[in-house]
Amino acid sequence: MSRSFKDSEEAWIFTRNSVELAEHARDQGNTPSAELWEANAESAWREHLRLAADDNPAQ
């Protein structure tokens, strides 16, 4: 995924929305679309964690 997020909150929102879209696609029997949204969610979640760590470095 090549999306840039302004902060960890935006990445979290995108993650949550992607999961919901994946569930909806799977419910509709659209497995390829569901798998795409799941991959987007995983990528956004990793970016969320990275940005959150940048925002709150260990002391």
Image (cartoon, rainbow, N blue to C red):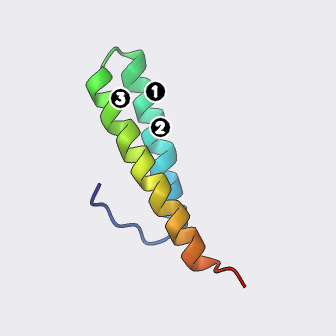
Residues at circles 3 and 1 in contact by the CB criterion of under 8 Å: yes
51 to 19, vertically: above or below:
below
Q: Nearer the viewer, residue 16 or 51?
A: 51
Kind of residue indicated by mark 3: Ala
What is the number of the mark on residue 39? none
Residues at circles 2 and 1 in contact by the CB criterion of under 8 Å: yes
- Left or right, 41 with respect to 9, comes to left
Report the residue marked by disc 3. 34
Kind of residue indicated by mark 1: Glu
Report the residue marked by disc 2. 19
User: For the residue labelled by badge 2, is the local secondary structure a helix, a strand or a loop?
Assistant: helix
Q: Earlier in the sequence, mark 3 or mark 2?
A: 2
Measured in 3D between alpha carbons, the distance from the residue under mark 3 to the one under mark 1, in whole angstroms, is 7 Å
59 to 1, vertically: above or below:
below
Quadrant containing the C terminus is bottom right
> Where's residue 19, x and y in %?
47, 37
Mark 2 Cα shell of 10 Å, populated few (<14), some (14-19), many (≥20): some
Quadrant containing the N terminus is bottom left
User: For the residue labelled by badge 3, is the local secondary structure a helix, a strand or a loop?
Assistant: helix
- The residue under the point 46% across, 43% down is 17
Measured in 3D between alpha carbons, the distance from the residue under mark 2 to the one under mark 1, in whole angstroms, is 6 Å
Q: Nearer the viewer, residue 34 or 20?
A: 34
User: For the residue labelled by badge 1, is the local secondary structure a helix, a strand or a loop?
Assistant: helix
What is the number of the mark on residue 23? 1
> Where's residue 42, x and y in %?
44, 47
- The residue under the point 55% across, 78% down is 54
- The residue under the point 34% across, 67% down is 4
Q: Nearer the viewer, residue 4 or 56?
A: 56
- The residue under the point 41% across, 34% down is 21
Q: How many marks?
A: 3
Quadrant hosting residue 18: top left
